[in-house]
Amino acid sequence: MKRLILTPLLFLAAITSCKKDIPLSEAIIGKWDLISRSQVTYMDNVKRNEYTYFYDPNESAIQFAAGGTGISYQNNDVYGTFSWTLSGSTVTIPGDIPNIWDISINKDQLVWTFSDSESTDTVNYKYDFTFIAKKSN
């Protein structure tokens, strides 16, 4: 009899303890403090260099607001404003050279990645960038 009562109670506890996934369009809203920026450089598809820069506390942040507006910060001061759109997991920040980022959010961590490339007469370069930020309190 105890088993019959415990089983539904455990099932109910398991269901109610599961946290619903927040849509990316809602999870991105807020201020994010940058933690690190990594770059991998390839020359003719051969990895040649990789480095990671770690930001000091309050050195740089980005804020996404509802309605597609945003603010960038440096040393807790407003550095600039921008507009943004989200389509699936791609954030686009328009401009002379638009920023197009693939993003993911896991709890309080935002990761965005993008690639760039350039060519000379003799070498093709590719750069992969990864930024990691933590949700501001």
Image: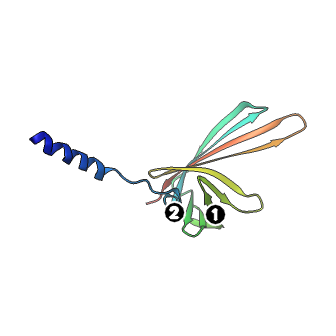
> Which image quadrant is residue 122 in?
top right
Q: CA distance from mark 2 to mark 1?
A: 11 Å
From the image, tell me which residue sits under label 2: 29
- Helix, strand or loop at label 2? It is loop
- Residue 33, percent from left and from top: 52, 56
- Disc 1 crowd, CA 10 A, few/some/many (<14, 14-19, 20+): some
Which quadrant of the rendered structure holds the N terminus?
top left
Amino acid under disc 2: Ile
Residue visible at 65% across and 66% down in the picture: 82
**Is residue 75 placed above or below 11 in the rendered structure?**
below
Front one among 1 and 43:
1
**Is residue 37 placed above or below 77 in the rendered structure?**
above
- Residue 71, percent from left and from top: 60, 66
On screen, residue 78 versus residue 1, left or right, reads: right
- Helix, strand or loop at label 1? It is loop
Residue visible at 14% across and 42% down in the picture: 4
From the image, tell me which residue sits under label 1: 84
